Amino acid sequence: MHQRYLGKTALITGAARGQGRAHAVRLAQEGADVLLVDICETFATTGYDGPTVAELEDTVALVEKEGRRALSYVVDTRDYAALKAAVDDGVAQLGGLDVVVANAGICTGSRFVDISLEQWQETIGTNLTGTFHTLKATVPVLIAQGRGGAIVITSSVAGLRGLPFLADYSASKHALVGLARSVANEVGQHLIRVNTIHPASVPTGMTTPGLFPLVVEDQHTLGPIFMNGLPATHSDPEDIAAAVAWLCSDEARHVTGAAIPLDIGTLMR
């Protein structure tokens, strides 16, 4: 495997499992030390169990198995002060920061008219505000170091298409594209790149039990929106991690402000 990240450090949010864990392992395999952040609790409005401290520590162990250093922090990205403290501590211990993967997010499935105020606030707070906090805590570090850097934000196909029954999620994921492109314009002069990735279905433990019955109910009009262009039902977290490893490397040094579909072809429908 490539060793594109020797001597580099990466910060990953939502790192306890799923895509976040896959990013941590892949970057460690390529030589990076990692700072791992996750809330490690279940949210009030989601229909699935949240990540645990034990899962976060399992990610640490997987990174260390690759011979790299890992530091873990149980932090809610909606808490800017706590997140900044974790970033500052990790950067001080590992000696710098080169890559930021803002991956933390949640999802629920329901008709728009049934989205509760609490559900809306929790989804927007975690997916959008938490990502803003992640960039606010890390971009000044990258600028001060003076050696550039790469930031990848996990959006979704729902950030490029208005997926039904995911209005709060889709709104948050669309907003991330605007955030990324605005920041990319500001920090490009510092050789810092900012991009979004847009996966389709990825099994990560983040499930939407209320979504499938709604799609089935309206399948004749809305079913095709969820169809893929390739004969696969989902991508594995490792598929997404492979793309992120390229996007954050010097091989993609001229890619910034881009929205990269990793979508099994669903967006071409």
Image (cartoon, rainbow, N blue to C red):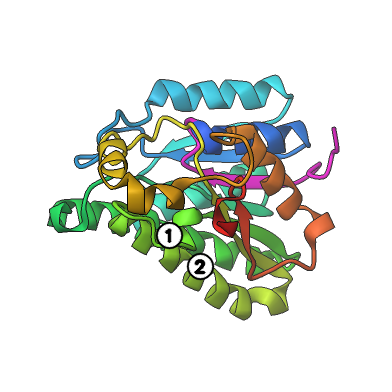
Q: Residue at x 44, y 56 (%)?
A: 158
Residue 82: image location, x then y, percent: 37, 50
Q: Dot 1 corresponds to which residue?
A: 173
10 in magenta: yes
Q: Is residue 18 left or right of residue 6?
A: left
Q: Is residue 95 above or below residue 139?
A: above
Residue pointed to by mark 2: 177
Crowd band around label 1 with a 10 angstrom C-alpha radius: few (<14), some (14–19), many (20+): many
Q: Residue at x 41, y 30 (%)?
A: 205
Quadrant of the rendered image containing residue 52: top left
Most common secondary structure along the magenta stretch: loop
Magenta-tinted stretch: 1-17
As shown in the figure, which amino acid type bears the numbered disc 2? Val
Q: Position of residue 77 (x, y in %)?
A: 38, 50
Helix, strand or loop at label 2? It is helix
Q: Alpha carbon of mark 2 to alpha carbon of mark 1: how far? A: 7 Å
